[in-house]
């Protein structure tokens, strides 16, 4: 068992006085390329990270315990706490017509929360897999992901796309996941960083994503306008030639989406060939497009990408919605300490918040513990 799974098991035994019926866990994720493409029906390419949330579960009286918050909550409520995620998943599974009884569960995890690494999808996916196994429902992974998304959208009230839940439930170790956000088809793509001698570094710039909501909504609206100007349902269907018919803001936003979708497909080919020079070039190009056309970068994110490039990163880019949050880089093994030190110095010198750094390994999606 993984460490988080052991902690969840212990928490269950200490709180409920018996062994759980089963233990499941699910990872957070980072998006390697394909940003602001999901709500345009396009492509994303996330990978799961080696940080997980585990749940120990058994039939019982509806108590939910979090080892990390050291709190017990009842499943039959809604209170804007962490417990709304597992409650929402149970609700969504019920809404889909599956009969489930009352269960109890203990959670423990190490996905940094609220950092854009999708701890929310991790707790949803772990809960969904546990409920599915506990009641022998036999719901497939993609359907579980859709139910988790419904839990987050409708029960918790956060309007997120399908990427996070897909990544948490469908990723494989040593691989990325190509998701077509229109058809909801997904395909594993090899991502052998060890073989390539590369480390995946995440820099959390710790910038409050203050303008994120309005900025995000503005971008979505501009994309919808651009699509309707072009007479297509979603920008996924727009081509490079179509861009000649757009002006100003609509042109810039659409140009990012159209070029980013193309970059994701090229990135998949590069990974299949283990061509990390090409993959890295596409990451840098994605950043430039997000910075100049989509205008969602920040001085901190730009600084990280620049410093990463100076330190020999094959590729680097902001990841997530932007306006703060995280950036990623693929760095030659052994260069990571130099990069993070240089970054800390530069950030301090420019009066930025002190960043947090993580190094992740592309990990397995949700699993039942053995
Ligand atoms: P992100 O998904 O980017 O990490 P969110 O705000 O979407 O950020 O989700 C974070 C929320 O998920 C936390 O506020 C908490 O409610 C829940 N959560 C995350 N990690 C845990 C955990 N280890 N135990 C219980 N709840 C957690
Ligand atoms: Mg989240």
Image (tube, rainbow, N blue to C red):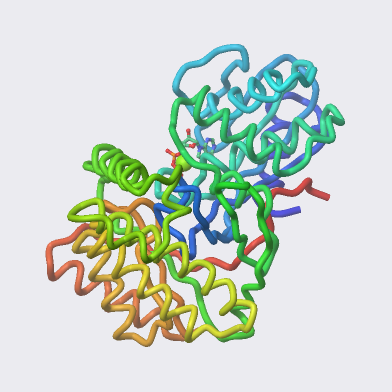
Relative to 16, does residue 369 appear above or below in the rendering?
below
Q: Nearer the viewer, residue 370 or 240?
A: 240
| Percent of width and height locating residue 28 | 55, 51
Q: Residue at x 17, y 55 (%)?
A: 248
Relative to 224, does residue 87 appear above or below in the rendering?
above
Q: Nearer the viewer, residue 94 or 232?
A: 232
| Percent of width and height locating residue 152 | 52, 31
Q: Nearer the viewer, residue 126 or 323?
A: 323
Query: Is residue 338 shown left or right of residue 98?
Result: left
Q: Residue at x 35, y 82 (%)?
A: 338
| Percent of width and height locating residue 120 | 52, 39
Res 88 → quadrant: top right
| Percent of width and height locating residue 339 | 34, 79
Q: Residue at x 27, y 73 (%)?
A: 343
Q: Nearer the viewer, residue 97 or 113?
A: 97
Residue furthest toward the left? 350
| Number of marks drawn | 0
Res 311 → quadrant: bottom left
Relative to 112, does residue 16 appear above or below in the rendering?
above
Q: Residue at x 34, y 61 (%)?
A: 256
Residue furthest toward the right? 136
Relative to 233, does residue 79 appear above or below in the rendering?
above
């Amino acid at each position: 068992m993984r460490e988080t799974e052991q902690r969840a098991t212990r928490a269950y035994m200490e709180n409920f006085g018996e062994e759980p019926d089963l233990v499941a866990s699910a990872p957070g994720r980072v998006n390697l390329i394909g940003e602001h493409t999901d709500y345009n029906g396009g492509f994303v390419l996330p990978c799961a990270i080696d940080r997980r949330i585990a749940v120990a579960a058994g039939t019982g009286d509806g108590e939910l315990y979090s080892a990390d918050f050291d709190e017990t909550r009842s499943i039959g409520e809604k209170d804007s706490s962490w417990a709304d995620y597992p409650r929402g998943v149970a609700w969504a599974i019920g809404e889909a017509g599956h009969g489930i009884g009352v269960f109890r569960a203990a959670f423990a995890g190490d996905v940094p929360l609220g950092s854009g690494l999708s701890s929310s999808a991790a707790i949803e996916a772990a809960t969904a897999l546990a409920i599915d196994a506990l009641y022998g429902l036999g719901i497939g992974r993609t359907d579980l992901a859709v139910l988790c998304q419904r839990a987050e959208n409708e029960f918790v009230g956060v309007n997120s796309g399908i990427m996070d839940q897909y990544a948490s439930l469908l990723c494989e170790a040593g691989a990325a996941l190509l998701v077509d956000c229109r058809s909801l088809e997904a395909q594993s793509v090899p991502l052998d960083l060890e073989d390539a001698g590369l480390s995946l570094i995440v820099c959390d710039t710790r910038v409050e994503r203050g303008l994120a909501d309005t900025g995000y909504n503005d971008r979505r609206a501009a994309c919808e306008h651009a699509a309707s100007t072009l007479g297509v349902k979603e920008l996924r269907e727009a081509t490079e030639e179509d861009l000649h018919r757009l002006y100003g803001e609509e042109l810039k936003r659409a140009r990012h989406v159209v070029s980013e979708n193309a970059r994701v497909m090229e990135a998949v080919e590069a990974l299949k060939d283990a061509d990390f020079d090409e993959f890295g070039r596409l990451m840098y190009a994605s950043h430039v497009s997000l910075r100049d056309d989509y205008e969602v970068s920040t001085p901190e994110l730009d600084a990280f990408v620049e410093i990463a490039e100076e330190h020999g990163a094959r590729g680097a880019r902001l990841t997530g919605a932007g306006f703060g949050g995280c950036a990623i880089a693929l760095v030659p093994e052994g260069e990571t300490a130099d990069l993070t030190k240089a970054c800390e110095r530069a950030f301090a010198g420019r009066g930025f918040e002190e960043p947090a750094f993580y190094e992740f390994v592309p990990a397995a999606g949700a699993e039942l513990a053995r």
